Amino acid sequence: MNSVRYALWMKEAGYKVLVYAVRDTPLARQAAMQGLEVRNVQRNRKYFDVLSARRLAKQFQADGIALVWFRDTRDMDTLGWAKRFSLNSFKLLYQQAMQFGVSKRDVFHTARFRPIDAWVSTLDFLRAQVESATRFSKRKIHVVPLGVDTSRLKSDENLRLPARAHFAIHSDVFLFGVLGRLDPLKGQHLAIEALIRLHQKGMHAHLLLAGEATLNEGDDYVKRLHSMVSEFGLEEFVHFKPYSADVQHFYHAIDVFLLCSKGETFGTVTIEAMSCGLPIIGTNSSGTPEILDSGRCGILVKPDEVSELVAAMENCMDSSKREEIREMGIRAKERFHRLYSKETSVKRMIEIVKDCIK
């Protein structure tokens, strides 16, 4: 979806945009649904797919392509060869989506990265990884966070009552929320465990879990979550809701946003919560500390540390700290508009594109 969003935004900015995608993939379907022009291509191998590279080189030249923007590392090698075969007739822009786990300073990876003209990391910590783990030219690395279009979130409106009614949750209860696929790595079980401990202390908060099981991975985790809830008699307090594209209901309904993941490279849901000025509790790992400005725009807790999560949730419910928590949400919203809005991101990406193809 990020690829489709940026394709749409660049088209809105006046660029002619073509989406190259394998037929009937989510990318191809979403791009077509959004009215983008789609070129169907064959699925390429990750390495040394010379035939696919030659076909792409010819197609790019026929379409007059000046720059190819990609996110999937599977395409990196093939696009590098396509660029060579086209005698460098187009530029390559790579928008980094994943962290580096190991060093890639060897000859193979150095050659693989060389055709890239602009490497875009979403956060400074990712840029630092690229600089330390590769031999890629530092002057070609840029930091541009993923942008969020807040128009669909209606973040400047007060829609708390209709949002609570949408989920059939009483307007007076204190509501924490987790948004995302139901998966152990997302940590919904930690949120439920923390809620159990709050109730044992007499703090009867509610929890909204919006999301569904990971496609094709079964429902064992979902059953585990429901079992935890029923074991402690919390059916009235934990609300399971399916994911909906109308996510504004979720953000307007909750009082505090929880990010319980072991680590999010770039948590788009965290950015969306910031745009709504919500208090945020997030794990102190991967990109979240940078997004939350080292705790100025949210409360950071250790991954898998339920006791820290409980303490943070207690702080958010403490009436004596209400103003402090509210100001944290205000700072988060200000930081969002300064760094993470659609307008800020697109403006910076256009500067990079222009610099590449000038």
Image (spheres, rainbow, N blue to C red):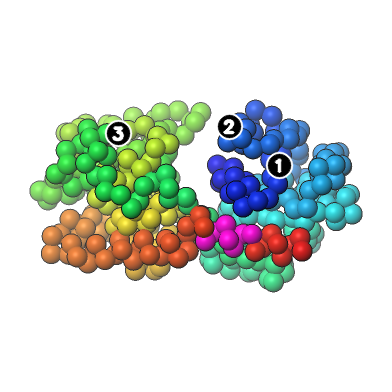
**In magenta segment, residue 347:** yes
The residue range painted magenta reads 344-350
Query: Residue 18's mark?
Result: 1
Residue on which the image places disc 2 = 33
**In magenta segment, residue 260:** no
State which tag comes first along the sequence, 3 or 2: 2
Q: Which is nearer the eye, 17 or 263? A: 17
Regarding residue 160, the answer to whether it shows in the image is: yes
Kind of residue at disc 3:
Phe
What is the C-alpha distance between the residues marked 3 and 2? 29 Å
State which tag comes first along the sequence, 3 or 1: 1
Q: Residues within 10 Å of mark 3 (few under 14, many from 20)?
A: some
Q: Is residue 67 left or right of residue 319?
A: right
Residue on which the image places disc 3 = 240
Disc 3 and disc 1 in contact, CB within 8 angstroms: no
Q: Which quarter of the figure is the N terminus placed in?
A: top right
Q: Within the image, what quadrant is residue 101 found in?
A: bottom right
Q: Residues within 10 Å of mark 1 (few under 14, many from 20)?
A: some
Instruction: State which mark lies toward you, 3 or 2.
Output: 2
Instruction: State which mark lies toward you, 3 or 1.
Output: 1
Kind of residue at disc 2:
Met
